[in-house]
Amino acid sequence: MSASSRIAHATGSVFALPARAVEPLMAGLQRLIGIKRMPWFFLLPNLAAVILFSLLPVFVNIYYSFTGSDRLYPSERPFIGTYNYETLLDCGNYLDPSTCSRDLFWRALGNSLVFVPTQVAAMIGIALLTAICLNGDIRGRGFFRGVFFFPVMLSPVVVALTWQWILQRTGVLNGMLTSLGLDPVNWLVHANSAFFWSVFVTVWAHMGFYTIILLAGLQAIPRDVYEAAKMDSANHWRVFTRITLPLLRPVLLVVFILAVIRSVQTFDELYVLTGGGPGSATLLMVQYIYEIGFAIQPRNFGLAAAASLLLGVVLLVFTLVQLRVSKGSNNG
Amino acid sequence: MQRFRLRLSCALGALVLASSPVLAQQITVVCDDLGFGCNTMQPIADRFMEENPGKTVNLEVVPYQSMLESLPVQLASGQGPDAAIVTDLGGLSRYYLDLTPYVDPDLFNSNFERTLQWLRGGDATSTAINGMPTSLTVNGGYVNLTLFEQAGVAVPEEGATWEEWAEATRQVAEATGTDFAMEMDRSGHRFASLAISYGAELVDEAGNPVVDDGLRAAIEQFVAWHQDGTMPMDLWGAVGGATHRELFSDFLNANTVLYFGGSWTLSQMDQEVGDLFDWKVIPAPCGPSSCTVMPGGGALVAFQHTAQPELVGEFINYLAEPQNLSEVLAAAVEIPAASSLIESGIEYPGSSERTQEALSTFIAQIPKMAPAAYRFQGWRYQRAMMNALTTRISQVLNGELEVDGAMDRIKQDVNLAIEAAKAQ
């Protein structure tokens, strides 16, 4: 018997011991509930975890959204019906947040509706461009892959503080402008530039992750397809639109869904970088929910729960559309 | 064998019974490590334990942010430490243990007459002793005297108005090429100093929010200072929501002539600015209504869920004894809340002459504080008002709201917060 066989045999014996010990138990259980129900028994631990940590909080959230007061225990929270939803949806004109009872909710929603498409489009566009460059035969390819992925490993707070240090009035960027004889700019004071930098910083921080996925997708496209196109004298643009994009579509769909989910969840970077300002120019939905539920006293858990459920409904609609599109795409 | 087991069980039982009172005589106090906190209280706690064998006081250091965000949730769930040093004095009042049976009421009532009210959540009829106010903080301005000297501008005297200070610091900034004349922390508490001196009530005697002409005048003046460049937009203009922000580095780098912060930055000011340039704390600038600034501070409070009310009371009472209290305050370089110590004064042996002088200036502002400032400090919904102030004023600075609109929103925000908290 070779050394490796002996090791395998010994390992098998070690694992066989506990298996043999529980065998009578399993046999007894199988007799009791029948073989068809046994899979449920094995799924039970994971199922319990999902129920406890995912489903139960959803139901608690729904319950909280119909209750008032700043008390924590559900039993101490009086039932107030749909009051929280009515407050959130109370608007003279939905296109003008200043006519709404909870104007900041609508401002946050409006900002999110602009931020998410802008950020996702920028994210996917730049990540795709980077992936195509990194897929080419360039010098130091491994190094550049590392460079683009590096920000993904940083904590969002570190990312925000670093960019705050760069963008503030006395920051690095203004230092460079001044040394070139130009006037410094207060980048985070004006609504439009603060919004631009919010998109820029979040794209910079997460782009590497999507670049890696797209790069893997590009590398999975067979080389011979490109060679055939080359023999047919197809130009770069034609190759990109007729070969690369269609074959990359399943990967792009995954990247798109992940990017949208991440974009809707954006919170930490902007909370530290702009705090939702200037004014409410970069206030997004998750920050609004956080501030209502946890930062502002007295804590309004009910309103935060209602706002998060409304956000959940928007995301649900979006996911259903996504599913429909992806189903159509697979069938097509 | 059976007899041995019986004996062993009896011995173990006796051990558990004997040790349980000792274990039970233990409390946990959470606090941060700045100023009057765990580090400066430790010598007193050690002495207390020495004098009271079998009684243990564990001082547990936690970050200040955790006191603001985690402690209220712990308390709401009936958990948490036996006692803590808190700064949201009115907001957490429903969890406080009334220490009257466990402390010397005369000592507390005579020493903390005004500040004890802050711990009662605005209940004017209450006589409960809900804790021991540890130290008093005072909002105030720091000025760069070197810049004044370079500009050849006279430093305004005590009694000067906010406008006079703005004018003088603008002249200094212009003459010396300094970026800004004045800066104020992005904090509703700091803004309340300006607002109350302009006649704002913020809260009435019955605990109802007040949005009045005084507040309007203060907001209009504050916005005007941002629009004409007297104040930088970075602090109040660039940030949204309730985010607290300060740019102490601007004063350190002589980028602003006047910095409006508070007494808690004094030791930092002394250590980091030191002799880089000449500076001093100024008396409260005056508004049309009064020359007042906001008081603040922390309190050592016990919570109702504690299993050791006697021990917590005994420890807090021990700490409240003037000689112990002055020892901690001297180490923390903070202003006493106890009236006996304000009258007698405290020596701060480790502090520089400039710090001592600055502390004297801060202490001198205490008798001048308007009743509205004290009332606002002890109001249960103070934070709701302060959050509304920072959020809405920032929106005005960015053109999202007019002053009138901001006033309506401030009132609505606070009313909605009160309504939500009281919802039945």
Image (spheres, coloured by chain):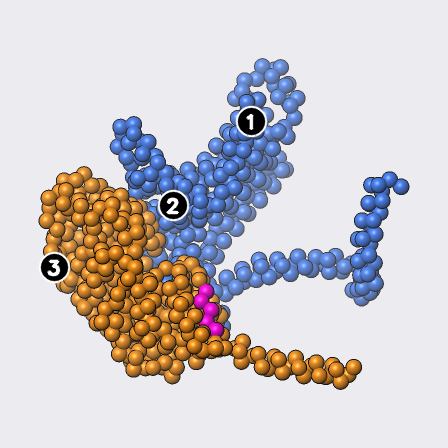
The residue depicted at 13 percent of the width and 48 percent of the height is B168
Which chain comes out blue in the rendered image?
A
Residue B58 inside the magenta-drawn segment: yes
Give the number of the mark in front: 3 or 1.
Answer: 3
Residue A22 or residue B82, whichever sits in front: B82
Labels 3 & 2 near each other (Cβ < 8 A): no
Residue B147 inside the magenta-drawn segment: no
Is residue B271 among what the camera can see? yes
| Quadrant including the N terminus of chain B | bottom right
Q: Marks 3 and 1: same chain? A: no
Measured as percent of width and height from the top left, residue B271 is found at: 30, 51
Residue holding disc 3: B159
The mark that comes first in sequence, 2 or 1, is: 1
Mark carried by residue B131: none
Q: Which residues are magenta?
A: B56-60
Residue holding disc 2: A273
Give the color of chain B as drawn.
orange
Q: Secondary structure at mark 2?
A: helix
Asked whether, in this view, residue A38 is left or right of residue B52, the answer is right
